Amino acid sequence: MFKSTDDYKDRMAEFVGMLSCKLKNTGSICWQVGSHVRNGRLLPLDYLFFEMFLDKGFLLRNRIIWRFNFGFNAKHRFSGRYETLLWFTKTDDYTFNLDPVRVPQIYPGKTKKTAAGHQPSGNPKGKNPSDFWEFEAQEAFLGQPVWDFPNVKAKHPEKTDHPCQFPNEVADRCILAFTSIGDTILDPFAGVGTAISCAEARGRVGIGFELDNSYAEEAKERLALARASQLVVRPSGKPPRRPKPTEKVARVPSEWLSTG
């Protein structure tokens, strides 16, 4: 599809320019990318897109890290286990709804001294979840300011045939935080329709484009299910499953045990 890295950069820069023309002044762009690996050499794609968006006058609000447990296992470097999400706005007049995505306070009893005496220092609605997302409801929410959720692999309830499907929770957090009910959400690389289905489920209007006909048809089916409140998704905030010590997959295999 792309002849070289330079060809990719040129075509994506042109595309970013098109997005700039269509986005409202109050709108946001969430650009999620990983890294390109060729001949064992890694190119962080967010580095390329950061420059592209800045050249078009966009303002970077957050560089969010989404960390997950499973993926391709590397042999000659450390295995990649995160992707980045760049949140850009077109102007300083943008939507940011913190309350729908707050997480529980780690120290709800913490106080600060005021003229009226010692008062709770935190927000009773919860704390800001930070820019490192892991989405683990109990361990992470209560133990550290991160969000933990698994990527779409194996028996994930949202799994389709798409090889790079991202989970509903990624889109859900962005849609709740950066848009309001009735807003229009565009996914120019719709895949199997995760973002547009999530948008519809949250009272927004979802629009997407997809070149692969099979994925586009599946996206239409998932969108119809979302509109009927029948789309099966992994609940946001549900902790990833960890095997119990008694399960076979959690035990050290006999082949690994020393015989000396």
Image (cartoon, grey):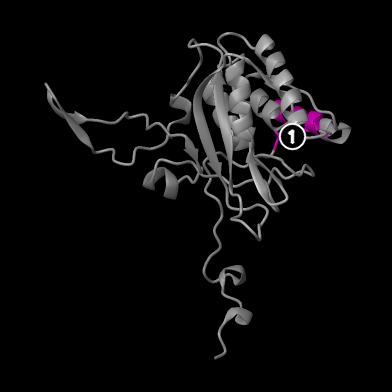
Rendered image quadrant of residue 194: top right
Which sits in the foreground, 68 or 108? 68
Position of 44 compared to 129: left or right? right
The quarter of the displayed image where residue 9 is located: top right
Q: Quadrant of residue 3?
A: top right
Q: Nearer the viewer, residue 35 or 255?
A: 35
Q: Residue at x 47, y 21 (%)?
A: 97
Looking at the rendered image, the quarter that the C terminus falls into is bottom right
Q: Give the residue at the far right of this rendering.
A: 213
Q: Is residue 250 above or below residue 208?
A: below
Q: Residue at x 32, y 28 (%)?
A: 123
The majority secondary structure of the magenta stretch comes to helix
Can you see residue 206? Answer: no
Q: Secondary structure at mark 1?
A: helix
Left or right position of 225 against 102:
right
- The residue labelled by disc 1 is 5
- Tell me what residue is drawn at x 83 percent, y 30 percent: 216
Q: How far from the left and from the top, in percent, is residue 248? A: 61, 72
Residue 87, placed above or below residue 192: above
Q: Residue 52 at what x, y percent from top left?
A: 63, 22
**Residue 113 in sight:** yes
- Give the residue type that dot 1 points to: Thr
Which residues fall within the magenta stretch? Answer: 218-231
Residue 42 located within the stretch drawn in magenta:
no
* Image position of 241 with respect to 229: above or below: below
User: Which part of the image, by quadrant, shows the N terminus?
Assistant: top right
**Residue at the image point whose x is 23% and y is 37% from the top:** 110
